Amino acid sequence: MKAIRKAAVAAIALATLSTVGLSACGSGSGGKDAKGKDGVTNIVMWHGFSEADGKTLKKIVENFNKSQKKYHIDAQLQPWSTIGETMVTKVTSGDGPDFVTTGADNGQGWSIDGTFQCVQDFYDDPSNETKNYLPNVTKQTEFTIDGKKQQCAVPMGYAPTTVWYNTDMWKAAGLTDQDYPKTWDQLLDVAKKLTKGDGSQYGMALSDSGWAAFMKGNGTGLYDTKGKVTINSEQNKAFLQKMREFYKGGYSKTGMDDTAARESFESGQSAMVIVGPWEDQAATDKGINHDLFPVPNGDGTYVYPDGRKGSNTGSTGLYWWVTSQVKDEAKKKGIYAFFKYYNNHDNQVMWSLGSAYPPNNKTVTTEELSKRPLIAKVSENTDNSYIGIAGLKGGFGDISATLDSVTQNTARTDDDISASLSKASNKIQKYLDEYKAED
């Protein structure tokens, strides 16, 4: 294959995770000392989970290491930024992780440039029980590499967004379950009903960044599945104008990123927020009575690879990736053994209850998640959720930042929206051409 530019791209899609920024440093294996003195194959894993999810992952790893005597997984906690910015260099020098968790948005480019090696042989072996994986989750990492379509990753943590709402505020506004919005416009109307005109309560804490899913669900998206830039459209302009009026109406506080939006909801300042399943524990810790409903569809014309339109449900899609530095067959077998172990029924129950991520294994039942019933509700949205910025060989960070500039200008200024979309279109086209030219 021809190598494309190995950009130092931070995992922006992970910004909503409560684990970002807390870390401990470790070192890679570099393929050295694959076997210890006792004949056990040592395998280095990198991950960025540092809170309850990290404790749960640590327990699963410990149990795996105790369950057999052939392999030892050395799970090393790294900042998400380190995984995004230095992992490629480390793997290239042979001193990186043997496998790592990161998003599908970054993973496609790193599979194409050879940083990651695809894992179709793992899926081809029926004993690995991949038939139990959720189809919409595995579809997100099926890429065409060197002209061949194949699986390049194994599910780790796939988290659809939902609308979380303060049940006390909902009831006080006279709303019931029958008022769950079925369309994006209805969602905005509900937010208006939940807003108090004196500024003491906003209807929704809506971040003005990370709108890729909203642009697809309500417009034409940023680019289509064939790589044609579509951001500069009348439909996108109309949607952005609608959202500018929403902010100007005072129904959401302006100038918030995802962290600030969550804080607004968790402090009781806002009645709703759109975020991943980790909000369940955060709201509970803050004493906010809460429930959730699906992010309603919009009237967008963007067509997803499976033919659907209108979905506003984005997802943080984390996967396990095997790096190119793994050339030892025993080490690869050990990694595959861990993948199978991690995604088996019992461990997915443990992972979901401990981390708040829905299970990757479709054999897990709602009853088995009864201790966290809202996480079971989140999992019902997996089939209608998509990674916001996907299908790229590179330039993910640049394109994400370009979109954020458009949406922040929409929410915070009176700048001409048409001019903003035109400028963004030119930038996105340049990024797509840059990576296409290096193919």
Image (spheres, grey):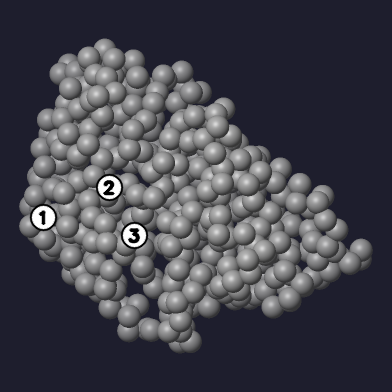
Camera-near label (2 vs 3) is 2
Q: Residue at point 45% right, 46% down?
A: 159
Marker disc for residue 389: 3
Neighbourhood count class around disc 3 (C-alpha, 10 Å): few under 14, some 14–19, many 20 upward: many
Alpha carbon separation for disc pair 1 and 2: 15 Å
Q: Earlier in the sequence, mark 1 or mark 2?
A: 1
Image marks 1 and 2: residues in contact by CB distance under 8 Å: no
Q: Secondary structure at mark 3?
A: loop
Q: Residue at point 67% right, 74% down?
A: 326
Q: Give percent across and percent down for residue 59.
A: 71, 43
Residue carrying label 1 = 235
Q: Give percent across and percent down for residue 147.
A: 43, 84
Neighbourhood count class around disc 2 (C-alpha, 10 Å): few under 14, some 14–19, many 20 upward: many
Residue carrying label 2 = 312
Q: Amino acid at mark 2?
A: Asn
Q: Which corner quadrant holds the C terminus?
A: bottom left
